[in-house]
Image: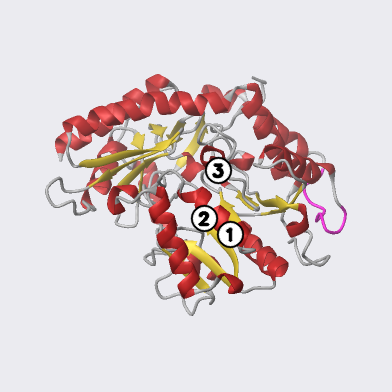
Amino acid sequence: MTDTLAPTVDAVPTERRVVTAIPGPRSTELHARRTAVVSAGVSSALPVYIERAHGAILVDVDGNAFVDLGAGIGVTTVGHTIDTVVEAAREQLGDVLHTLFTITPYEEYVRVCELLAQHTPGDFAKKSVLVNSGAEAVENGVKIARKYTGRNGIAVLEHAYHGRTNLTMAMNFKASPYSTGFGPFAGDVYRAPNSYPLHDGLSGADAAKRTITYLEKTVGASDLACLVVEPIQGEGGFMVPADGYLPALQEWCTANGVVFIADEIQSGMARTGAYFASEHFGLVPDLVLSAKGIAGGLPLAGVTGRAEIMDASQPGGLGGTFGGNPVACAAAIAVFEHIESEGLLAAAKRIEGVLKPALLELQKRFPIIAEVRGIGAMIAIEFADPATHEPLAEVPGTVAAYAAQQGVLVLTAGTYGNVIRFLPSLAITDEQLRDAVGVIGDALAAI
């Protein structure tokens, strides 16, 4: 650890600590200022204002320390303020902040694309374009697929979440709060049934047959440019599809000239114990979308795929003013190096080995936990009435509120609002995990 980093790192404890009410007086004061100048459309799950962070701990302006089980919805996957990532960004800040890669390029952009080509599934020639956000990656993936195929149709799956731009709002399954009142939306988007084993009880083969039948009857393969899937769905509730489901969809896409796009924005970058979750299912997507965890907290995203598809665009058809910013690229290079040097693929598996058994023990105590699911550091619990199997949408919010008062930050999710998702950074310790799960257990006991 360098001296320049010491003041921030040394000021962050390694365990939760609650010293005021949640939110505390300084957070309350800041929130009053916020409501006067920040759009009400930009809401916050917990109005505590963070001052510093390191590893898996957030510290607010009142000195409360939270075990962070959300990682900025999967962004700080390697951990908050990891020394090598911060130092790489700081060094780049002193060299060059911006040139616009499409005017005068720089090596850092090229290196990130080399790393993406190396670590995304498939041993064929690959190329990338770097952009700013997950939604922008989705937009570019779709337009590249349309250009390559000459077709218009976009297929997505039930329970999908892809962003808040006009096109991605049309691709989302859940309208509220993401798209309510914001239409009209982009057209030629078709939503097919997904594999949701807890609710549909279908095998992977049967679920795939249902999806493919819908696409063939409703759209027609000859009019379909791409199928965009999250290998493990994020906002939808961390659904893990039945065995064989995704490979069957990819096989159908390949046979029909449909570009298979894996949205790995939340599930990628070592989150599941593989660089990309597609690897768990034997998938080799035509295009892979990256964002969130790729740059350790700085805004960066990418579309990576088969060279012949990525080269379908005319020169100047891809890019943007801030896409592939040098500082974000420098941080991303450090993230890739940190994953390798610290063995973070194994760390994700370690987290699953601690978290999933602990949550299964809670399920034995509390029958309202209908399922514990997920892979690596991407685990969820879904709540339903044990007798009627109806979703219990009130439980996650109640648990999250209780946990926050005890210094644990958890995220809710799910189409029906009845899921708690666990997205800890790969820097979290076993002790921090067990302590946080203990708080969740106390919350459930208190309901």
Q: Position of residue 441 (x, y in %)?
A: 23, 31
Q: Are marks 1 and 3 in contact (CB under 8 Å)?
A: no
Q: Is residue 70 visible?
A: yes
Badge 3 crowding class, 10 Å Cα cut-off, few under 14, some 14 to 19, many 20 or more, is many
Q: Is residue 99 magenta?
A: yes
Work out which quarter of the rendered image holds the C terminus and state it.
top left
Residue behind mark 2: 249
- x and y percent of residue 384 in the render? 21, 48
Asked whether residue 230 appears in the rendered view, the answer is: no
Q: Residues within 10 Å of mark 2 (few under 14, many from 20)?
A: many
Residue at 50% x, 48% y is 231
Which amino acid is tagged 1? Cys
Residue located farthest toward the right when viewing the structure as drawn: 104
Label 1: element kind: helix
Indicate left or right for 132 with 400 as reference: right
* Residue range corresponding to the magenta coloring: 96-104
Residue located beneath label 1 in the image: 253
Query: Closer to the camera: disc 3 or disc 2?
Result: 2
Q: Few, some or many C-alpha atoms within 10 Å of disc 1 (few <14, some 14-19, many ≥20)?
A: many
| Snapshot quadrant of residue 144 | bottom right
> Left of 308 or right of it: where is 357?
left
Name the colouring of the figure. Answer: secondary structure
SS category of the residue bearing label 3:
helix
Location of residue 258 by image quarter:
bottom right
